[in-house]
Image: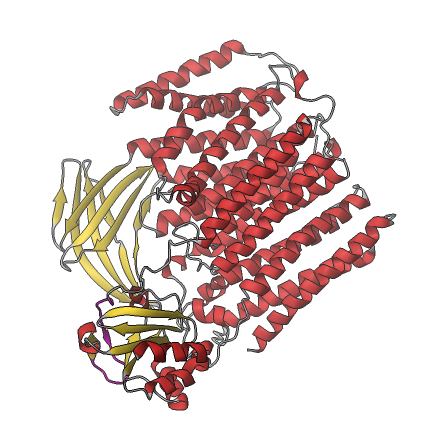
Amino acid sequence: MIYSVVGHYSLILGLCVGLILIFFSIQNFKNSNQLDAKILSFSFLQLFFVLISFLALIISFVISDFSNETVFNNSHTTKPLFYKISGTWGNHEGSLLLWLLVLTLFIFIFLLRTKNQPIKYKILTLGFQQVIIIGFFLFLIQTSNPFNYLFPVPDEGLGLNPILQDPALAIHPPILYLGYVGSSIIFSSALAATTLKMVSTSWAVHIKKWVLISWIFLTLGILLGSIWAYYELGWGGFWFWDPVENVSLMPWLALTTLLHCILVLERKEILTSWVIILSIATFTLSMCGTFLVRSGILNSVHTFANDPERGLFILIFLFALIFLSLYIFFFFHQTSKNNSSNFFWLSKETSILVNNWFMMYFLSVVLIGTVYPIFLDVISSQKISVGPPFYHKLIAPFLIPFLFAMAIGPRLKWIRSDLKDKIYLISLLIISILISFFILKNFNTNILINTILISSAFYLFFITLRDFFNKKYKNFAQNTAHFGFSLLILSILFNNLFSSEIITNLKVGETYDNLKTKIVFESINQKKEKNYKSIIANFNIINSEGIKNKLSPELRIYNQPNITTSEADIKTTLMKDKFIVINLVQNQDYFNVRYQVKPFMLWIWLSVIMISLGGLVSFLQKRI
Amino acid sequence: MKQKLIPYSITLIFFIIFAVFFKSLKDTNIYTPKTKINDDIPIFSADLLFLNENSTTTEIFELDKFYLLNIWASWCIPCRDEHPILMSLSKNNKLTLIGMNYKDNKKNAKSFLDELGNPYEKIIVDNNGTNSIEWGAFGVPETFIIYNNKIIKKYIGPLNQELLTEIQKTIK
């Protein structure tokens, strides 16, 4: 009760500080000899108030204070402490508060860490950031206050959705938000830099760190979400092209492209329009994602309650930001004189530009696949759903030139170059084609496009692998990320091609047997935990080589709310995952058993970690 | 002129996108429960509050009689506001009031009714909210007027004096 009051009022105080900060910014902008000390202290004060508010919500969750509506809706006394805390951001109101916390934290760090940049630029960035922050404050207080009262106080809460009670998902939102919100700093500073006409190499060097840090967090955030989907949803996949996954992928694609443009801008004053538009796009796509998820326009596995009023607020806010940035871009930005016309065709910047266009293509595919159903519904009231085949068919063929450009591009020099080691590059290409041809031939899945796709991925794989041992080759960060990417594509392809699945209904004691695999349903146990009861089925799986594996998938029946989830049992080895999941069949004697062998699952996770590691290396590296 | 064309057309495109999103927000119906007026009432069976017995649609709703189904919960503040109106409606013998106790706890529900009075003839327990969804409810409170096993009126949100007279007219 007292915590709700504290939390609520410190939110309002935070909003007031935001308004004061805008006022100071305008004043300081007019006579900007040095940064007003007040600005820094008020930014800290704002961060402090939001932090207090956030802590108040956490405490309300920990002590199960059901007079708070958010706690009542999302918590329960029997929940383990860990999930009580993670429940704080496992819901709409709390996650927005977390978002606000990161927003204020990042602008404070930005003010603290940005040196050697004009004062006007810092103030203007703060101004734009405060517009976003105030927008979020109003959104939070107006439509989704996490500190609403309930009277009379209920004895017990409604509980956290069991599928959210998972360690990966407990840290997935904060990491993802760090990525999303980091892009807000890029957005504000790009707008500020455009207004002051200072989009230049020195600005690129300065903003690169922010691009990298948001990119790393966004990558890891998406990875954690994917891991959660794999282990918890029990569908045996790691990416479903679900709208909510797509809205996290879109900012990632924009941000990755931005990162590459920044690398060019660091050295040569070109691609400025690209950089500005991508900075704007990354953040607006993140916001657009929030809009699509929270307004209930899209149907998805994500569990946020939806409310048209919230949707309306974000929609208006989002488009206000878009129109503001369009105005700034068109009225302040002038393309530099040495624009793209004097690119030499064989140079690093050309290959980056080529890949940018590919990235934009992938982005458009995902964007269209995600929002087209909405447009169609409005315009012709037809309902369609866009599934994985759409994305696979439109993306896979274009990955081939993309991967080749990724392999060759980094080996080129800036401005003008010609290829060295031609023989070497060609022989690697032939090796890649041969390897992929033999792999596919052995497995009877000889499809032309697969061969080419796998060879292009192998090509990138071999070239980057070789460059690790090439002493002349200095760009370790880039090489790690590209190597990780080739590994990712290879793992995904092999995973898709060589997965096998058995679906059957079994009773206890029965055995399923085909020539390759024998599944013995040995026994069933019951277990009672604090917040759920579980039925554990014990399987013994024997493959053709006589190797035995014991797997025990679970059905959990949570007590609050009363939901049954199935927990897959997964045996992870270096080369493949064995995945088994059971479900109840109406007729209670039988269980529906799904057993899958999924090769290279571990490598999908590892390769994404490697990609972000590349980002981390680049972040820590001093500029040469 | 040509230079201005690009900004204007891009702005226009974004306006169109805005309009589409705005419209789809207005008639978003993915989660909207389907029940419309003049639909048959859903068939269900549920526990009754305080009675320890199970009941079904046909047992509760008889033909040729007016019923008012009110979805409420003890934690719902607007329910508290509309309660006097339900109390006065319960005095009308042409109308039978049925309550549906939404996601509530028995003890709180009881003390709520002890404090404010019980206008309902029977109260259906809806612990997980599924019955309310079947009825097409958006939230609490919500009120349905039923005649001949059909929903003839539906009120979202708390009842007030104006709606009270409307209901009284309907049942006449």
Q: Is residue A184 left or right of residue B125?
A: right
> Compared with residue A480, is residue A511 higher up or lower down, i.e. above or below?
below
- Quarter of the image for the C terminus of chain B: give it: bottom left
Is residue A617 in view from this perspective?
no
Query: Residue A54 colored magenta?
Result: no
Quadrant holding the N terminus of chain B: top right
Residue extending farthest to the top is A423
Q: Residue furthest left?
A: A510
Residue A462 picture location, percent across and down: 46, 22
- Residue at point 66%, 44% (across, down): A324
Residue B84 visible, this angle: yes
Overall secondary structure of the magenta stretch? loop
Question: Which span is picked out in magenta?
Answer: B41-53
Q: Nearer the viewer, residue A160 or A495?
A: A160
Residue A298 in the image: x percent, y percent? 42, 49
Residue A488 lies in quadrant: top left
Where A477 sits versus A164, above or below? above
* The one of A13 and A596 positioned closer to us in this rendering: A13
> Is B152 on the left or on the right of A324, as rendered?
left
Question: Could you say where residue A381 lies in the image, as x and y percent from the top left?
Answer: 37, 45
Decide whether residue B48 is among the magenta residues: yes
User: Colour mode?
Assistant: secondary structure
Q: Nearer the viewer, residue B102 or A434?
A: B102
Give the residue drawn at x 19%, y 59%.
A524
Q: Is residue A435 above or below residue A258?
A: above
Q: Position of residue A263 (x, y in %)?
A: 64, 30
